Amino acid sequence: MYRILALTAKDLRLLLRDKVGFFFTFFFPVLYATFFGFIFSGQGGDGPGIKLALVDEDRTDGSRAFIERLRAAPEVTLVLARTDGSGELTREDAVALVRRGRAAAYVVLAAGFGDRADQPFHGGPLQLETGCDPSRQAEAGMLQGILTRYVYQGMQETFADRAKLRQYLARSMVDVRQADELDPAARAALNLFLPAMDQFLANLPEGQDSLAGFQSLEIKNTDVARQRRGPKNPFEISFPQGIIWGILGCAAGFGISMVSERTKGTLVRLRMAPITPGQVLAGKALACFLTTTGVATLLLTLAAVAFQVRPGSVPLLALAVVSVSLAFVGIMMFLSVLGKTEQSAGGIGWAILTVMAMIGGGMVPLAFLPAWMATVGHVSPVKWAILAIEGAIWRGFSATEMLGPCAILLGFGALFFLIGARAFRWSESG
Amino acid sequence: MLRLDGLRKSFGSTCAVADLSLELCRGEVFGLLGPNGAGKTTTVNMVVGLLAPDAGRIAIDGGGSPAEASVRARIGVAPQALAIYEDLTGEENVAFFARLQGLSGRELTQRTAWSLDFVGLTDRRGDRAKTYSGGMKRRLNLAIAVVHDPPLLLLDEPTVGVDPQSRNAIFENIQRLQNDGRTIIYTTHYMEEAQRLCNRVGIMDHGRLLAMDTVEALIRDHGGMSVVTAENDAGLCRVETDDPVAELGRLQAAGGLRIFRLDRPDLEAVFLNLTGRSLRD
C-alpha cells in the first residue's frame, strides 16, 4: 500500500503543477456550473415571483392604491421605473422589457382606472391591459389570477369600511340618476338596491364593520412536504453538470498521463521497480478517484454555500459520487489505450467523452433532451452519473431507486477498466 | 553476481538474443557493445525483468530471478531514455523512486540526499527537472538508479547527448561505484568509454555474443596488427607488425628515421574484424 500511495501522491503532485490541467479539472467546472446556473435562472436572481413591468397612465389615488397592493404581493416583483433612473416606465418601455426577456409580462393601468375602481355598481368592468410572452403561458395564467385577487382585495377593503361604502353608495345613486344610457330595468333595480343597502348600513350598530359576520370563503392550508418533482433552483441542474465536466476532465487528464508515462519512458522505469503492474495501475486509479471525488466535493460544497443547493440525502449523494468516480476511473483506464501519443489519446479521448456528454445530458439537461436522445443516452455513463447525482440532490430518490444508476455506473466502470487493463501497453514497442 | 545461461529471446521469426551465456563477478564493470539491433536492449530488458526469456535462466545475486520483485530491488537501472518526471524537482524524482524501492523515514531522507550529492545535484535539488541541462538530467537519471544502493547496476548509454564536463562527472561516478563493489553492466557506442571503464567487454551482433574478454585480450586476439607508418632515407613506408617497437628499431637501424606514426588496434578494430562493419553503422 505504501508504494501505491507513493504513486498516487506523485500523480496528484503532477496534477497540481499542471496549470492547464488544474484549471480544467477544478475551475472550469465551477465556471460552467455557475454560468449555466445563472443562464437557466433567466432573471438573474432579481427577486422572487413573476417579474412584472407596470405602467401607471392613470396616476390617481385608485391606481396608486392598486400598485401599493401589488408591491406588497409576494407573487410578483414590480418594475416601475427605467433602469437608468430617468423616470417611470412608459407603455413602450414595458413592451421592450418583455420583448428582451427582462420581465415576464407588463400591466398598464390606463387612464380612468381609478374612476372605474370607484364605480363597482355600474359603468362596466374594471380593465387592465396586460402583455405576456406567448412562450410563458403558465406565467400568464398565474398573472391573471394574481391581478384578479388584488383587484378584489381592494374592493373588499372598501366594502369593509362602512363610512367609505356609504360614500360610494351615495355617489352611485347620483350617477345612476344621471346615467341616461342605463337600462331602465337595471336603473329600477339599482334604485331599489342602493337606498336599501344605504339604509342597512345606517342601521348597523356603532363599531360594527359593514362586512362583519360575512363569510365569503375560508381556505385552511396544511403544509405537506411533497415529493419534489423538479429542481428547487437552476443550480441544482447546473452543478451536477459541472461536476460531470470536472470528472470528464480528470478521466481525460489521467488517461493522457498514462500515455505520457509510456512515451517518456517512466512507465518502463516503474515496471523495473519492485512493484507489480497491478500496483502501478492501482496508484494511477487511486489518484484519479481522489481527484474526481475532490472535484465533486468542491463543487457540491460551493453549490451548498453559495447557491442554496441542498441535497435531499447526503448519504445517497456520497454513494452517487463514489459510484460516478469509480465509473470514470474505469473510463480513464480505457482512454489510456486509445492512442499512441498524448495528442492522439487526447483527441480520441475527448471525442468519446464529448459524445458521452452530448447524449447523456452533460451539455443539455436531461429534462430538455428529446425523447429519442434520452433513449440513446442510456448507453452513456454520463446520463447515469447525472441521474445518480440529481437523484440524491432533487429527484428525491430512495435508496432502492439509487441502486439502479449506481449499479449501472459500477458496471460501466468495471467493463471499461477490464478492457483498458487488458489492452494496456507498458512500452512503446508494445 | 549475475549469471546468464543459454538466454534466448525471439520476436516472431526474428531472433533477438541467441544462446547468450555470461557471468559477472561482484565489483566488475562489464561493457556490452554492439550496434542498434544487436540484442543489447533485449538482454538488458530480460535482466531487469521487463521481458521473459524464451529459454535459458537468469540468476542474480545468488540465484533469484528478476521476475521476483525482491530480486528487482537489487537492481538499479539508468535507462537510455531519460525516465524522469519533468514537473517534479530533482529531489522529488529521487525520493519518489526511492519510495517505490521501499525506502521510508530517515533512510529515505538520507539516501535521497546521498544520491543527489553523489551526482552533484544538491544545489539544484529544489528545481524542477525540466529546468536542468541535458547533462544534469543524465546525472539525475543515475541518482535515481543508485538511490536504493543496489549491488547490480545497468547503465544504458549513460553519456548520450551530454557535454564533456558532465561526461567526465559520470565517469567519476561510475568509477566510485566500482570501487564501492557494485557490479555494472554498461552499454555504449563509445569505444573509448568501454576501454576506459570496463574490466571486460562483450561484443554482440545479431543477437549473439561474438567475443567476451578483457579489452587487452580482445585487442590482442581480434584487433589485428599494429601499423607503423615512417619516413626515412628510403622514403615513406607502412608496415603491419605484431611488435611495433622492434619494427621501429629496424627502421632506425636502416638509417635516417625522421618521422613515424604508430596505430595500435583498438576496440573499433576488434568490432570491425569480428562483424565486418563499424560499430556506428
Image: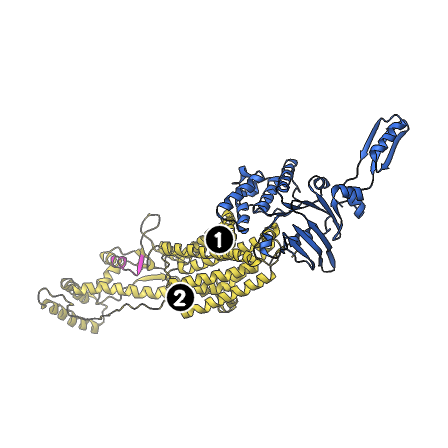
Chain colours: A yellow, B blue
Q: Closest to the observer: B216 or A25?
A: B216
Does residue A172 appear to the left or right of A366 in the view shown?
A: left
Q: Give the label, 1 or 2, closer to the camera.
A: 1
| Vertical placement of residue B197 versus A317, above or below | above
Q: Quadrant of the C terminus of chain A?
A: bottom right
Q: Closest to the observer: B12 or A414?
A: B12
Q: Is residue A73 magenta?
A: yes
Q: Secondary structure at mark 1?
A: helix
Identify the amino acid type marked 2. Answer: Arg
Residue for point 56% across, 64% down: A418
Q: Residue furthest right?
A: B234
Residue for point 59% across, 62% down: A422
| Vertical placement of residue B163 versus A410, above or below | above
| Vertical placement of residue B171 versus A54, above or below | above
The residue wearing badge 1 is A25
**What label sits on residue A395 in the rendered view?**
2
Q: Secondary structure at mark 2?
A: loop
Given the image, what chain letter belongs to the residue carrying mark 2?
A: A
Tag count: 2
| Residue B164 spot, x, y in % from top left | 66, 36
For the magenta stretch, what is the residue range? Answer: A68-77
Q: Closest to the observer: B67 or A13?
A: B67
Identify the amino acid type marked 1. Answer: Thr
Q: Is residue A357 visible?
A: no
Q: Residue B59's image quarter? A: bottom right
